Amino acid sequence: MNAIEIRDLEFRYLGSRKPSITVPYFSVSEGESVLITGKSGSGKSTLLQCINGIIPHIMNGTRRGETYIFGESVSKARLPDISRTVGTLLQDPERQVMNYRVEEEIVFAPENFNLDKDTILQRMEDAIQGVAIESLRGRETTKLSGGELQRVALASVMSMDPRILILDEPTSSIDPEGTREIFKFLKNEKGKRTIIIVEHKVERVLPFVDRIVVVDNGRIVLDGPTDRLIEEAHNLIDLGVEIPSHILIANKLGIRASGIDEVRRIARECGMIPHERARSNGGPVAFRAEVSVSYNKNFSLAAELACRAGTIHAIMGRNGAGKSTLLKGIIGFIDKDQAAFSVSMDVEDKKLRNPEMRVAGQYLGFLPQSFDLMLINSTVEKELNYSKKVRKLNGVDELIENLKEIFSLSDYAKSDPLTLSQGQRRRVAMAAMLASGAKIILMDEPTSGQDYMHKQNLGREMAQLKGLGYTFIIVTHDSRFVYEFADWVTVLNFGKVALQGTPESIFSKSEYYGVVPPSEFVLRYENEQLAS
């Protein structure tokens, strides 16, 4: 029996000139696991909303065709009834979690289903064990890291015991250890329920799915077994699909390899070593900071950071290691009622101690993980020009026009930023922040939710901006992005600096601290070890 069946579907958002999704026919069998991927804004999230009932019950627009869940029409069913069958984990857990403590959040749905107490408690325990969040019991949801919050949100979805599980970018804010737990969970759930995963981290998801579906420009352009990824590798790169490094290396070697272990063996036999990345030593130290943050007995951070001009400095580590806290401490974005903190920094020959945010903002640009908070204007164009207007900046018009092109925003200049996809909204926020005039740029998870094409564009543009005097400090779990573009890495562990150095020197020993090196580095490192 088909768990999901779509016939002659087309949906157009209000004010849009073309459909966001057009699907003549699509089906998913009961118990099947499907990966949906493609560029940001290609229509993936719209497709999901047509399955879980958000369209047409909440989101307005012009719609034709129909979606069926186990043979029942989505448009004719009540949304509360659909939610009992289809559980959805959103990209941004802060939009989904609404309760004060972890256990309260997990039991929220079963309580609203009016289940008996024993069933509610059993579902809570099963969800906590299944998602491996025993360590988060009793915690306040407002004090969890983004990755921890996302796993709590997943547990709350699982407490509903849905027959269909939709995961929209489930690992976007999760460290490698948390990602392993998510995929361990998916492995255990595979076949027990129907699973749809929207994810850009294709390499990590492939072993846990039966099919891959690629969406481009509102249409399904590929739908087949995961082997199709190997056959279509180079074509799919143009469609924004992040092809695993071992597949690209296998293609370069002219072989058909089923996994990274086989590629490792063949690469060693061929003596192939992936090329070494160019790193910039940069200019003189452009930014130095000492940050101390203490949340009573729950968590404390004490870290020093020094960044050279014209470099990309990555901050990595497990969820809860203090990465986002470090950035917020630098910018002064800490609630003084919740924590004691101090910051001393040297920037542009100025010595600042505990500066007000408006003062720090003259020198530092900050893109938070919850970037939607930055979008306050009615159009993309007004958003990009906001700093120019408020700060009365001169000579930035050309930069703003370039940013529109760099971040693929020209076609959306007159659009309301909040109507765009998450990846597009993130790019708007990035471009607006770069247009502020600050030269020290802090970014919290800038690649989260971005497709491969835009991550590559972001990395290349950051590399260009380095030559214009920009210095970037980015918090990220994306080791592949760091290996390709970063010059220096700091690894945090329990609020302390554990490692510092180039990506090559860090990735050879970072796994102990929850930072998994990319497969391309693993191949190079193993071959160099064998050679020595």
Image (cartoon, rainbow, N blue to C red):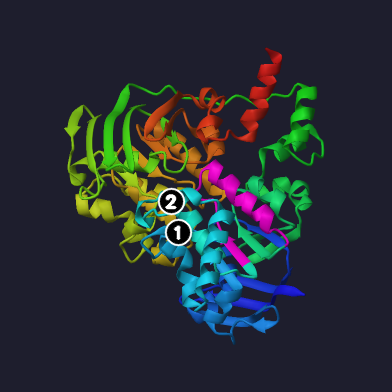
Q: Nearer the viewer, residue 208 or 133?
A: 133
Q: Which residues are magenta?
A: 165-191
Residue 35: x and y, percent? 67, 58
Could you say which disc has been placed on residue 93 in the image? Answer: 1
* Residue under numbered circle 2: 146
Q: Residue at x 67, y 23 (%)?
A: 526
Position in image of residue 273 (x %, y %): 69, 24
> Image height check: is 268 above or below 259?
above
Q: Secondary structure at mark 2?
A: helix
If you read the primary sequence from the N terminus, does the residue marked by circle 2 or circle 1 appear first? 1
Q: Amino acid at mark 2?
A: Gly
Q: Is residue 465 visible?
A: yes
Q: Which residue is painted at 53% across and 70% down in the image?
A: 118
Instruction: Give left or right: position of 192 versus 298.
Output: right
Circles 2 and 1 in contact, beta carbons < 8 Å: yes
Residue that sits furthest to the right in the current view? 255
Marks 2 and 1, Cα distance to the nearest angstrom? 7 Å
